Image (spheres, rainbow, N blue to C red):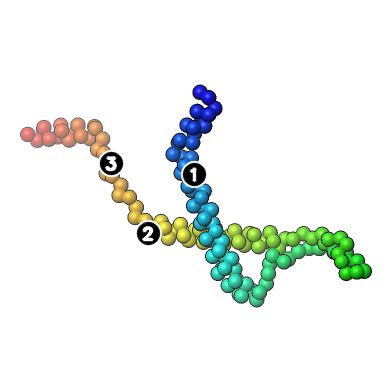
Amino acid sequence: MGMISEFKEFIAKGNVLDLAVGVVIGAAFGKIVSGLVDGIIMPIISMLTGGVDVSGWKHVINPAQIGADGKEIAAEVAIKYGDFIQSIINFLIVAFVIFLVVKAYNRMRKPAAEAPAATPEDVLLLREIRDSLKK
């Protein structure tokens, strides 16, 4: 079997198509949740914390060097831990919103009715024997 035919067989499997659809829908849903976080939730958190911008927090190792003419000679060297903290906060909020959406979806979806379990063959045989003895 050639590589091209193997590739065609791989692509033709339903799992690959399902995965592709899931990735596309997941990316679109991620944009929706990010918009919710950036546009609604983070302004509320900013209001509650007095407008504190965590993303600007940093530890300056070497400050920027400014020349006599006011131009920057050497850039500032800093550890920007605020961006990392902001990313963690965003991740936790996005994960929580996705959790709430999935929880609401599962609550709305009705569980499938379970089919009654088939009676084992030995029980059926015993019932036949019991019925024949009653006669």
Residue 23 located left or right of residue 64: left
The one nearer the camera, 76 or 21, is 21
Foreground: disc 3 or disc 2 = 2
Choose top left, top right, bottom left or bottom right for residue 62.
bottom right
Please identify the residue farthest to the right as the structure is shown.
68
Residue 97, image x, y percentages? 51, 61
**Residue 65 rendering spot, x and y as whole percentages:** 88, 64
Query: Amino acid under label 1?
Result: Leu
Please give the name of the residue rendered at 19% of the width and 31% of the height, measured from the top-left corner. 125
What residue did someone put label 1 on? 19
Disc number placed over residue 113 in the picture, else none: none
Camera-side mark, 1 or 3: 1
Q: Amino acid at mark 2?
A: Met
Residue that label 3 marks: 117
Q: In the rendered image, which residue does mark 2 sit on?
A: 108
What's the amino acid at mark 3?
Ala
